[in-house]
Amino acid sequence: MRQHSLRPGLAAGLLVLLAACQGGPRPAPGDALARCEALFAAQDRDVEAARVGRSHPHRIEGFPYLRVTRLLSSYREAALDPQRAGAWLARLAEEDARARGTELGLLPPAERERLAADWPPGPAAAAAACRDRLLARDRASPERLALLTERAVVADEYSTGARVFGLYPLAAIGLRAGVLRWHDAVRARWQLPRDALARGLPLARYAPGAAVEPAVGPIPRDALGLPAPAPGRLSALLDRHAPVWVVATASDADRPGVPLLTRDGPTVDAGVPTVYRYATVTRFRGSPRLQLNYLAWFGARPAEGVLDPLAGALDGVIWRVTLDEAGAPLAYDSVHACGCYHLLFPVGDLRPSPDLGSLPEPPLVLPALATPGPGERMHLFLAAGSHYLERAWPAAPADGQRYRALDREALYRVAGPGGERSLFDPDGLVPGTARGERWFLWPSGVRSPGAMRERGRRATAFLGRRHFDDPFLLETVFGAGDGQGAGAVSR
């Protein structure tokens, strides 16, 4: 009964908005568009003033109702194709709607009430109505579409100024030597017997609650060719490929949980083991591929000595599964939430490109992994304290604690002093997670190396330019096959 009573009010509110946009029963078209642009400008001003903006997806100058990711930026040519422009614009609009909804929800109550009064039937509904109106205008305008293709780009995560002042060509010599030493150390650990990895510490196993379901058919695609599974199908895929986390446990900092923001800095509530998950898309050998991401947060990386430049509050570890057309693993990779310690693993006959050694910083590709068989899951061994991924293998899940799976969007509404806040600041970093290593790694151009950061803001190399969300990352590492895209992630 309550839902039926709301519908007339909502419809009336939308009519009020459109009438206000139109300025009367027979408006000039420009008046409606101008008022809609004013709506987005007003919301963005309030979001910026309250410091609740999201740094990902990225805003597009002159198109406040759209936002872009590195993947969608790689499809800019779709705007000039009448058959694909609508699908591309719809994706950009969805990105803004999701991000804007978070931002509006985090505004102080007084600001939300004012926006609701100024823009009936409410800021979110008003934005949705205006977004549709502005979409219709821009889709019909070749000039606006051409301008959008120029501006729908994502800046890289490197500061050229820092590299200039840090004498990057000289610093790169030491940085490369350090990176290669780390590569050697990682490969040496992966050669050890699995039983030797725990170093006598107890092991905690965290397994997903869902059963392992068999794969079901190819993944549907939209007009751009991007994977577009229905929500239920996506949830089933995330359940199917969810890993078991095997963690050497020396302290509470080795227990995965829910991030919190306190007056003393960020920490984790490990009362209920929790893993966050989300889907992304990459491009590989001429075809977009669905990726499944699993993110575990730990309360800290404890110091191993008096002056440990790697220690600090909060530590996140991501496991990513790239799927083939049939929903089976094509490749795996892992990175920490700082963008550090990126490891890549081929599957089957996939092989690293022979040109990797010529890159300023070669990515670290480890031996191929076997895919889980029926009833099996990938098991991930994490070291105590550092949470380094030191082994991955398929096996039937053994006894262990069940972890809760949450959508990654929940990280934009975490508990903090005075109420819910985003875990990330408007620049994409997690406040309070700076590491001492930033004082000697800044010539790389990476902002605050070692600090935890938001999706889409993770640089994964100190030399050259490489990002965890680059749509051509796998093509660079494992070869483009068709010759397109290789070399796009490191210049």
Image (cartoon, rainbow, N blue to C red):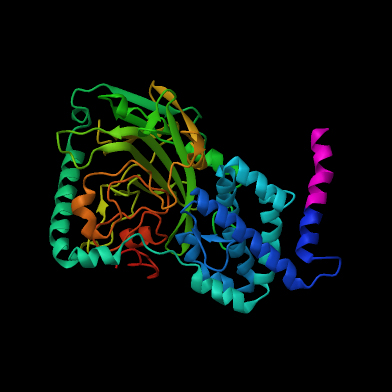
Task: Report whether residue 396 is seen.
Answer: no
Q: How far across and down, in percent of the image, does residue 49 sit?
A: 51, 52
**On screen, residue 182 above or below 489:** above
**On screen, residue 113 above or below 419:** below
Q: Is residue 26 left or right of residue 267?
A: right
Q: Quarter of the image holding residue 316?
A: top left
Query: How many dots with numbers?
Result: 0
Q: Residue furthest bottom?
A: 143
Q: Nearer the viewer, residue 429 or 288?
A: 429
Residue located at (15% from left, 33% from top): 305
Q: Quarter of the image holding residue 370?
A: top left
**Quadrant holding the C terminus:** bottom left
Residue 422: within the magenta?
no
Residue 3: within the magenta?
yes
**Quadrant holding the N terminus:** top right
Q: Is residue 100 left or right of residue 325?
A: right
Residue located at (56% from left, 46% from top): 102
Q: How far across and down, in percent of the image, does residue 328 sit?
A: 45, 46
Q: Which residues are magenta?
A: 1-13
Task: Report whether residue 439 is seen.
Answer: yes
Q: Residue furthest right?
A: 25
Q: How far across and down, in percent of the image, does residue 335 sit?
A: 33, 46
**On screen, residue 170 above or below 262:** below
Q: Is residue 269 left or right of residue 63?
A: left
Residue located at (25% from left, 44% from top): 435
Q: How far across and down, in percent of the image, does residue 234 sit?
A: 55, 43
Q: Nearer the viewer, residue 199 or 122?
A: 122
Q: Main secondary structure of the magenta part?
A: helix
